Image (cartoon, grey):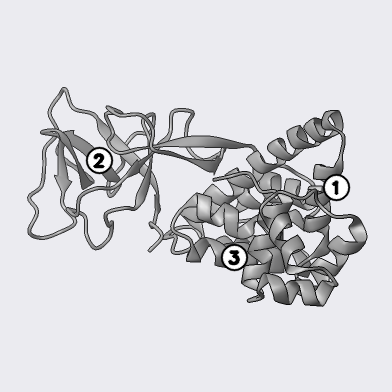
Amino acid sequence: MSKTTFAVALKRARKAAGLSQKALAGKTGCTGSYISQLESGNRRAPRPKLVRKFAKALGVPERRLQELAALERSPAPIRKRIERMSKRRRSGDRLLSTTLFHFARRPTVVNPMEAFVDLPPEQQMLLGRLVGKARDADSPEEVLEASEDLLAETSEQDRERLLDEVLPGVLAGGPAPRGTAAPVRRVAVYLDTEHRDEAVDHVVLDARIGGPAVFFLRVAGDDAHPRIEAGDLLLIDPDAQPQGGDTVVLHVDGRDHIRTYHQQGGRVRLDAMRPDVPPLRPGDEQTLHIVILLVRALR
């Protein structure tokens, strides 16, 4: 995705408002030609007074447009320093967007909104809007782009709280205690338990969930339908030991099979979740991968 500039933000806001360049010019005392040059990046960003007029005419928050315009008007050394700060902030926004993309819509064991109940009303509203954008998007990148203006209006303190306190609560099923910051980590998503290919994604997860070697498996088959569907994410802990009734994954004949673990008389039986799918018995050389968390794919 291309870097957001004042020109990009102005054009995006104008189109969202349903205004032509000529119409916006008429509302702000400019010419259509001047608007065109601004949006194409051929004119330097305007001074604060005109930026304020643009924001009012377009019905968008002024702060984001002012920041972008000021950045473009700044001397090169200052601009580079601001850009480095923005890059770090954008990295946090990307983690936030990725997390909401994977967990906001239809989680099986995690209800994101339960983590918001103890927040101030304004933060509840912010997170509710972010969750709504995540539900409408087809990728984390779309969530990030759709949330850009909203996050730009969020203070640094609130951003840090989102990442350090609220999101770990979302993933753990409840809010972190006030005044504390739950540890988080980026967990890789693989297409099979053998990790034959590189990770296809990463998800921000509460570091207290599972052991240090946990990873996500993106389900490809339908042998566990309807309980587990293709596209769902299974959090697997290689260090966990199976107990009766646990959901496990076994790699057989080049593919992963999802089963329910049972042990009777010293023998292990892996029952299918569908009546038309046969059970399995693990061989001595095969590893049972224990599923500790199921997260529904966004649909």
Q: Which residue is mark 3?
A: 113
Labels 3 and 1: the sequence-earlier one: 1
Q: Is residue 163 visible?
A: yes
The residue located at (81%, 31%) in the rendering is 81
The residue located at (85%, 47%) in the rendering is 70
Q: Is residue 244 left or right of residue 205?
A: left
**Relative to residue 266, is residue 172 depicted above or below?**
below
Percent from the top left, x then y, of residue 43? Answer: 77, 50
**Relative to residue 141, is residue 76 depicted above or below?**
above
**Which quadrant of the structure image shows residue 100?**
bottom right
Secondary structure category for the residue under label 1: helix
Q: Amino acid at mark 3?
A: Met
Question: Which of labels 3 and 1 is toward the front?
Answer: 1
Mark 2: few, some, or many residues within 10 Å (few <14, many ≥20)?
Answer: many
Q: Amino acid at mark 2?
A: Val
Q: Amino acid at mark 1?
A: Ala
Q: CA distance from mark 2 to mark 1?
A: 54 Å
Labels 3 and 2: the sequence-earlier one: 3
Q: Nearer the viewer, residue 242 or 114?
A: 114
Q: Which residue is mark 2?
A: 249
Residue 70, label in figure: 1
Secondary structure category for the residue under label 3: helix
